[in-house]
Amino acid sequence: MLYKELVDVYEKLTSTSSKLEKRDILSDFFLVVPEDVLPFVTGLLAGYVFPKWTEKELGIGPKLLLRVISKITGIPEEKVEEYVYDSGDFGEGIEKAIELKKQQTFFDLKIEIKYLMDLFEKVSAYGGKGSQDKKIKYLSELFSAASPVEARYLARTILEQMRTGAAEGIILDAISKFSGIPRKDVEKAYLLTNDLGLIALYSKKGQDKLSKLTVTVGRPLKPMLAQIASSIDSALKDIEEPEMEVKYDGARIQVHKSGDAIKIFSRRLENITEALPEILSELKITLMPVNIICEGEVVAYKDGKIAPFQYVLRRLRRKYQISEVSEKIPLKLFLFDCLLIENKSLIDLTLKERRELLISSIKQSEIIKIADNKISREPSEIKDFYNKAVNDGHEGIMIKDYLSQYQPGARGKKWLKIKRTLETLDLVIIGAEWGEGRRKKWLSSLLLGIRDDDGNFLPIGKVATGLSDELFTEITEQLTPLILEEKGKTVTLVPKIVVEVLYDEIQHSPKYESGFALRFPRVLQIREDKGPYDSDTISRAYEIYESQEKTF
Ligand code: AMP
């Protein structure tokens, strides 16, 4: 199959905003994609080359790509960069460069999807810095063969800036349509495996095959999440058999053990095993079953006290000198759930059963413990548990339904959270302005975007104060490579970086496209653990707006 055929599908998807039409375009296409490239093609349609939980990545940034395009077209890098700025999109900028070149030369080689798949595999095998030359060689070969429109989509794919609107949900709809398998069964298999490509392939093989897919060590599941409870009383109304747990303020991890091999995944399902060597070595002693998947929260300690959550995130990001930092900021892991033991999925068991199995599978130590819990329906006891958790420096408590099953990816009413802080919003930085005077080198006034149901990020406010110098520097460093367009001091950004924002109130406002504005927004921290599609939505803002109406 030719890459051109996939590009035609991208073009068709872009030309309609109807979800049903998109589903039909995808479904028709899935029917004709050969099985050997189906998983790969499905990933490309969803906007990724490798599922993010694999260790594989292309490791190609905008700079490297500009170099490649400049090399093969003979157009200076700055000029290609200018095309990118002018069009506001990397793909279109690169398309223009290739177009100019193609006017002079004539060859248009046909790119096979299989060739692309093998090429990406080869590129991903060259991880380190010294391997840039090899990557440039492969990419030059690829882009020399590409037509301008192919180059546009290749660039977007490589930089993970696909905007065809083929969101996960639509792809699942299309898989269900082409295979005739009910949507809920397709979705169930997806929640258990997190691999759209695998789901497409198995759906093609038939419902029988698809239904055999289950929780597997090495394939992270989307974590079950909690809704906010406004009070203990309201939580007790929702949950019949409540179990309270301390809500630790750290980073969620999912541990997968198979024999001697242990992998640790983040909440965003990225493999972060290497960032946590001391937890890894402790897990080897702690986990008794040969195969197990369990979940917990990693918390940082500084001078014997619980350290703010940013310390854990800093550790997760760090690639070098981990041992030095791990001495300064030791970590602990509090386990609270168990999803598989000896290759048997536990997700359909009750939390009570899962927790009992977890306790009997773990040798607790100073570093790895089971999360503190308490069973009670007595509001005064719950209050005491909450006060103790908060006094000990934790974020609050979780109230979970002890009889509930584990629902991957769900944010339902089976798990509720009561936090000590005001509710914050996780928003995406979509634009910024270069500062003045002392702040000249910083992107200082940040335009915050909130997600709508279609995955667009609409402005909800600007924030320019409340950030430390350190945070400004860090944010500027992370945002600079994401600049799409620069007009005077104002820049437009690829919506990627998520920040946690505290504010005094959410107000209705015609000033911003989202229809809401934040009163006195302050950035608390960068949410390294969240991607733009994990950020909060307009519906969430609406809920908070409504609840605040009741409180005030
Ligand atoms: P939030 O990020 O506010 O939606 O809260 C959910 C997060 O709380 C989870 O993803 C975990 O990282 C964290 N957490 C801390 N302690 C617990 C616990 N005992 N049970 C479940 N999640 C917990």
Image (cartoon, rainbow, N blue to C red):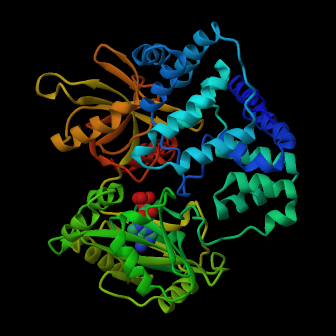
**Vertical order, 251 against 178 (above or below):** below
**Vertical order, 293 against 43 (above or below):** below
Q: Position of residue 165 (x, y in %)?
A: 64, 34
Relative to 185, 244 lies left or right: left
- The answer to whether one can see residue 26 in this image is yes
Task: Kindly give the residue lying farthest to the left in the view shown.
Answer: 438
Of 275 and 385, nearer the camera is 275
Q: Position of residue 235 (x, y in %)?
A: 46, 68
Q: Quadrant of the N terminus?
A: top right
- The answer to whether one can see residue 232 in this image is no
Residue at (42, 47) in percent of width and height? 544
- Which quadrant of the render holds ligand 1? bottom left
Of 281 and 398, nearer the camera is 281
Q: Position of residue 505 (x, y in %)?
A: 32, 41
Residue at (46, 16) in percent of width and height? 80
Instruction: Give the number of marks.
Output: 0
**Vertical order, 9 against 420 (above or below):** above
Q: Position of residue 127 (x, y in %)?
A: 47, 50
Image quarter of residue 315: bottom left
Of 98 and 238, nearer the camera is 98
Image quarter of residue 211: bottom right
